[in-house]
Image (tube, helix red, strand yellow):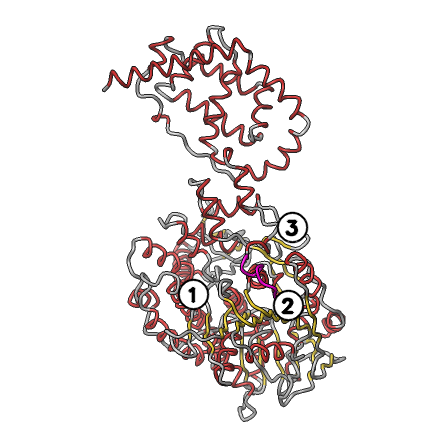
């Protein structure tokens, strides 16, 4: 066997040697090099400048030097080579201008050249036995029988091993060609759809008219932005005798039975089926098609729904974009315009003081900190308050809305975030903007603090004066006098026309990428896809993928199949909630071991049975647990075999929703308990870069209160984290008192712009 293997190696080596000699006599290498050099010289700089940023995303594959030939056949044929001589040749080879030009022609820009040269040099020096053909080339060059450029084919072969994309760049670009997304949905393109755009402001009846057509159709689908809206349509349809199923990421309900699907479906827009034919489809809040995170779902629904009639509801500013998109599908848009049904008046005076709050008022805040502050101050004036913000469970939001809407209830005032802009029917007399500044994410995923947009201001202000309620004439004003003129100017404008619709890589596209780049992580594949993709930017943009990448990097070390990994990373998780993120990681690990994630697993990790919250910290933690249960239910519909106890989790979640409701009803008491709890402890002000404490490191109680509220508003603290911080600080205070010395505490703030404040380990430097 060994003799046979050696004979084959010798035959292969002799063939390679003869071919090399023939190639030298014909002058092929030099002629081809000269021919191509002039053709590519002019485009080289431009090519490199465009490709260099993308190239840095391709991670080099480590080549094992032990994979070289086990027997030194090359030495038997032409003699041994000195490693020092090889190193000299390689250094000379990498410096040649002609070689760099050839590299550029073969897709290796300056960054890839540097990486590939280093890898090739290391391979040639560290390998005990070089491949026989490469050994012969080095021997010929050292003896003057070959040219140093003859190394290039072997270097290129190695470079393509280190960077597999060099062999498939054209395929990758073809996969990520997103210029014609309308063609992805062949079933929708195969029929002639009637597109009807219901354009109008809030409280104009546009959605009502679309829903009347939906309910009268033989079959239909409603696609909404929120679970609350989908649930409302589900309930309304079934109440009116039209059997309707509910489909959201976390829930399924049936109008008839599980085994007999209804002809009508109400779903969240991400859950829209683009494979089921309907007579009528309704897409609500179409202006969300521009949303940097979720816009892709509206684009997919608008292009992909297989329906005879597609009724689209939203702002008039969406029309121009929809018409341009329809030009690519060969469809036309029928426009039905609606005016507001009730009067809305912008007041000439600001509220000025919470003493001026009246029944039917809703104060809109853009942070939990302001929610807590305002609600506490209003209740201190003897008025009961309903509170709604985005982190609350749907049941709690509905309970707070019912409490506020009930004319017989003593609660006449609401404090809410912009979560009231959609999904809740509220009887509001006056909207009061507590602030006009709101943190947002731009197209690049960067957090910005800016004045609210015209679209957002109109959406929120329009909630005042709802048709057929006790407050049909709506009013709107600002809390601060300085904001009133700005608010009047904003509300006097019309929303800017939409320019682009969102797109997002599909699982199939990423799987194709992974086939070509098997050694790349999912996060890396997404980065490469986004940077290589071609988008018609006159109509579309690539949605922000930072949340997806955040989850992908979190579970990168967990062994999962690519498709499962992609699904996990699509989970709707608030990455600013540390407890939710830690549970996401635990669930992924359990799944990777093929172990069922049971209700006992959830109870053990979430502290079931749940207790009534005593402080705001407890309430925030319960909200995080609710999100974990949502995550479980979301995954249970995608991996049914390993999430077998969805029914038990859903029952526990209902119980938790009721507990959270009771906590929100007593939110002022929770705030007072939190402040009282803080008064007994000393905490450093983490908002400062550097703080010096002398002997007894105590802060004024007012500062501690503001700190607590700020951290709570950002959802960054849980009871466990707070307990650890207290222990750490108390231990340092005791040490300080015992030693009777001054200490400097240096705090490192995180640069994570999504979390705002993130705690790092404290480093203590003792002054000597």
Q: Which mark is residue 718?
A: 1
Q: Residue at x 60, y 74 (%)?
A: 421
x and y, in percent, of residue 251 in the image: 42, 71
Start and end of the magenta stretch? 186-194
Relative to residue 119, is residue 675 depicted above or below?
Answer: below
- Nearest to the eye among marks 3 and 1: give it: 3
Left or right: residue 500 versus residue 79 is right
Q: Which residue is mark 2?
A: 195
Can residue 559 be seen here? The reply is yes
Label 3, secondary structure: give it: loop
Per the image, is 188 magenta? yes
In-front residue for pair 325/459: 325
Q: Which mark is residue 536?
A: 3
Q: Residue at x 37, y 26 (%)?
A: 65
x and y, in percent, of residue 644 in the image: 31, 66
Tell whether label 1 touches label 2 (CB within 8 Å): no
Label 1, secondary structure: give it: loop
- Which callout, 3 or 1, points at the residue further toward the start of the chain? 3
x and y, in percent, of residue 317 in the image: 70, 66
């Amino acid at each position: 066997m060994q003799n046979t293997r050696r004979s084959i190696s010798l035959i292969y080596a002799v063939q390679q040697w003869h071919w090399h000699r023939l190639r030298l006599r014909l002058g092929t290498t030099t002629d081809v090099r000269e021919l191509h050099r002039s053709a590519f010289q002019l485009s080289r700089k431009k090519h490199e400048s465009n490709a260099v940023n993308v190239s840095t995303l391709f991670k080099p594959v480590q080549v094992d030097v032990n994979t070289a030939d086990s027997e030194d056949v090359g030495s038997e044929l032409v003699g041994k080579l000195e490693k020092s001589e090889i190193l000299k040749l390689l250094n000379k080879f990498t410096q040649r201008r002609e070689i760099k030009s050839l590299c550029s022609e073969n897709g290796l820009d300056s960054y890839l050249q540097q990486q590939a040269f280093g890898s090739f040099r290391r391979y040639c020096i560290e390998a005990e036995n070089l491949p026989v053909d490469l050994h012969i080339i080095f021997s010929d060059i050292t003896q003057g029988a070959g040219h140093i450029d003859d190394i290039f084919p072997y270097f290129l072969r190695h470079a393509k091993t280190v960077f597999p994309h060099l062999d498939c760049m054209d395929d990758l670009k073809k996969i990520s060609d997103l210029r014609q997304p309308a063609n992805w949905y062949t079933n929708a393109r195969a029929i002639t759809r009637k597109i009807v755009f219901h354009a109008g402001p809030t409280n104009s009846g546009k959605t009502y008219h679309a829903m009347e057509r939906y309910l009268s159709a033989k079959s239909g689908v409603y696609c909404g932005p929120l679970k609350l809206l989908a649930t409302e349509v589900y309930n309304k349809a079934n109440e009116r005798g039209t059997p309707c199923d509910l489909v959201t990421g976390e829930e399924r309900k049936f109008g008839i039975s599980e085994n007999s699907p209804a002809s009508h479906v109400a779903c969240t827009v991400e859950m829209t089926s683009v494979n089921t034919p309907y007579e009528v489809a309704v897409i609500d809040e179409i202006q969300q098609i521009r949303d940097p995170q979720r816009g892709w779902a509206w684009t997919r629904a608008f292009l992909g729904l297989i329906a005879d009639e597609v009724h689209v509801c939203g702002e008039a500013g969406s029309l121009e974009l929809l018409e341009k998109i329809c030009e690519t599908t060969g469809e036309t848009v029928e426009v039905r315009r609606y005016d507001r049904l009730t009067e809305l008046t912008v007041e000439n005076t600001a509220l000025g003081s919470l003493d001026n709050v009246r029944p039917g008022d809703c104060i809109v805040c853009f942070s939990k900190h302001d929610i807590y502050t305002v609600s506490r101050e209003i209740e201190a004036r003897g008025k009961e308050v309903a509170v709604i913000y985005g982190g609350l469970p749907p049941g709690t939001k509905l309970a707070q809305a019912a409490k506020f809407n009930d004319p017989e209830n003593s609660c006449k005032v609401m404090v809410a975030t912009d979560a009231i802009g959609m999904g809740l029917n509220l009887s509001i007399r006056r909207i009061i903007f507590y602030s006009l500044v709101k943190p947002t994410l731009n197209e690049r995923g960067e957090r910005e603090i800016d004045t609210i947009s015209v679209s957002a201001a109109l959406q929120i202000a329009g909630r005042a004066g709802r048709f057929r309620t006790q407050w049909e004439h709506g009013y709107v004003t600002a809390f601060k006098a300085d904001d009133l003129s700005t608010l009047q100017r904003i509300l006097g404008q019309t929303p800017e026309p939409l320019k682009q619709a969102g797109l997002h890589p599909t699982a199939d596209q990423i799987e194709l990428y992974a086939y070509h780049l098997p050694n790349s992580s999912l996060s890396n594949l997404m980065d490469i896809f986004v940077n290589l993709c071609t988008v018609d930017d006159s109509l579309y943009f690539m949605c922000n993928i930072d949340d997806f990448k955040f989850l992908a990097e979190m579970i990168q070390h967990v062994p999962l199949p690519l498709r499962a990994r992609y699904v996990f990373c699509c989970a709707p998780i608030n990455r600013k909630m540390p407890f939710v993120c830690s549970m996401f990681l635990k669930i992924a690990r359990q799944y990777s071991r093929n172990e069922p994630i049971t209700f006992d697993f959830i109870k053990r990790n979430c502290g079931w049975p749940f207790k009534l919250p005593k402080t705001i910290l407890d309430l925030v933690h319960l909200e995080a647990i609710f999100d974990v249960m949502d995550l479980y239910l979301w995954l249970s519909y995608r991996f049914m075999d390993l999430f077998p106890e969805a029914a038990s989790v859903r029952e526990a979640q209902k119980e938790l929703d009721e507990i959270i409701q009771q906590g929100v009803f007593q939110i002022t008491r929770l705030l007072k308990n939190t402040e009282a709890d803080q008064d007994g402890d000393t905490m450093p002000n983490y908002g400062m870069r550097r703080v010096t404490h002398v002997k007894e490191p105590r802060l004024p109680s007012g500062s501690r209160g503001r700190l607590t509220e700020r951290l709570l508003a950002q959802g960054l603290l849980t009871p466990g984290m707070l307990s650890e911080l207290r222990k750490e600080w108390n231990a340092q205070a005791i040490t300080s008192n015992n030693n009777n010395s001054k200490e400097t505490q240096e705090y490192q703030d995180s640069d994570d712009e999504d979390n705002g404040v993130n705690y790092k380990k404290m480093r203590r430097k003792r002054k000597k």
